[in-house]
């Protein structure tokens, strides 16, 4: 499936990703140099490695919610479909990122370590 539509795919399936790496571009997120998303090709080689490591070590987790109305909440962007990991202790950010189906990213995720 296309990388940039991952948030919609998660929302339709009532699923949420947890602990998305802080150091990797989120699906659909534009890099400052891009005017249009190129999908997973927007990730640098280092970011792909960080994401691959998170998948291999099990820190990036997927949870499916079975509540009947939950996909609607996700698709309406009331709840995030991706929660980033908590920023490290030396990060300038107090909270991790959250991504919503509509592409909005905020910094109201997990508190800094």
Image (cartoon, rainbow, N blue to C red):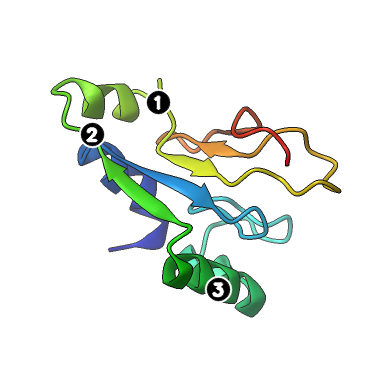
Nearest to viewer (mark 3 / mark 1) = 3
Q: Secondary structure at mark 3?
A: helix
Q: Disc 2 designates what residue?
A: 65
Cα separation, mark 2 vs mark 1, equals 15 Å
Q: Residues within 10 Å of mark 1 (few under 14, many from 20)?
A: some
* Residue 3 point in image, percent of width and height: 40, 61
- Residue 56 position by quadrant: bottom left
Q: Secondary structure at mark 1?
A: loop
User: From what the image shows, is residue 79 above or below residue 50?
Assistant: above
Cα separation, mark 3 vs mark 1, equals 26 Å
Please state, as top left, top right, bottom left or bottom right, where the C terminus lies in the image.
Answer: top right
Q: Which residue shows up at 30% across the image and 29% down it?
A: 75
Label 2 vs 1, first from the N-terminus: 2
Q: Residues within 10 Å of mark 2 (few under 14, many from 20)?
A: few
Q: Is 52 on the left-hand or right-hand side of 49?
A: left
Q: Which residue shows up at 34% across the image and 62% down it?
A: 2
Q: Disc 1 designates what residue?
A: 77
Q: Disc 3 designates what residue?
A: 48
Nearest to viewer (mark 2 / mark 1) = 2
Mark 2–mark 1 CB contact (< 8 Å): no
Q: Which residue shows up at 27% across the image and 47% down it?
A: 9
- Of the numbered discs in the image, which one, if any, rests on residue 103? none
* Residue 45 point in image, percent of width and height: 62, 79
């Amino acid at each position: 499936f296309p990388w940039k539509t991952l948030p919609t795919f998660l929302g339709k399936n009532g699923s949420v990703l947890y602990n998305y790496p802080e150091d990797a571009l989120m699906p659909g997120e534009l890099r400052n140099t891009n005017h249009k998303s190129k999908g997973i090709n927007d990730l640098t080689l280092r970011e792909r490695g960080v994401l691959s490591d998170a998948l291999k070590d099990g820190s990036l987790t997927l949870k499916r919610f079975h509540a009947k109305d939950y996909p609607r909440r996700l698709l309406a962007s009331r709840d995030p479909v991706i929660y980033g990991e908590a920023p490290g202790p030396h990060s300038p950010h107090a909270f991790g990122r959250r991504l919503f189906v509509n592409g909005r990213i905020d910094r109201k995720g997990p508190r800094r370590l």
